[in-house]
Image (tube, rainbow, N blue to C red):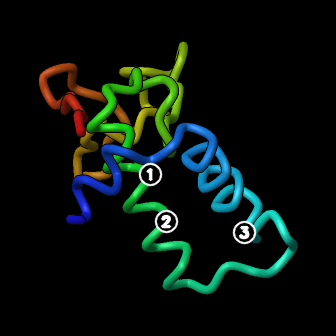
Amino acid sequence: MTYEELIERLDPNVYQSLRQSIALGKWPDGRKLTPQQREISLEAIIYYENLHNIPEQGRVGYLDRGSKAGTECDPSVRRNQSGNNDVDPDQFVEVKS
């Protein structure tokens, strides 16, 4: 079985368990995730979400910028290096995955 087939057949309960484990930093039995386990689990979750067309708002790592979108608080806005704090609307960058 390939990695793609494994993720395709991944049970939604296992997916949710992986998400929770990453969020808490430990497995359901209480053992701490190693950095390598966290990385592999996160890659599997991201792949699962892309494969199963999970809405962007429901994906791991989604940040709702809400009313801050497009303002100086939005990290996708490029700032002038000259120290001028004015934001030029032509410098907005659309961030997509």
Q: Is residue 12 left or right of residue 74?
A: right
Q: What is the x, y in percent for residue 86? A: 33, 30
Tell me if label 3 and label 2 are in contact, CB under 8 Å: no
Seen at 21% across and 25% down, the residue is 88
Quarter holding the C terminus? top left
Q: Kindly state the secondary structure of the residue where label 1 is placed.
A: helix
| Depth order, front residue of 21/79 | 21
Look at the numbered disc 3 and give the secondary structure of its residue.
Answer: loop
Give the residue at x 76% y 71%.
Answer: 26
Q: CA distance from mark 3 to mark 1?
A: 15 Å
Q: Are marks 1 and 2 in contact (CB under 8 Å)?
A: yes
The residue wearing badge 3 is: 25
The image shows residue 45 at horizontal and vertical percentages of 44, 51
In this view, the mark in front (3 or 2): 2
Does residue 81 appear left or right of residue 29 in this picture? Answer: left
**Quadrant of the snapshot with the N terminus:** bottom left
Numbered circle sitting on residue 45: 1
Residue pictured at 25% horizontal, 64% vertical: 3
The residue at which mark 2 appears reads as: 41
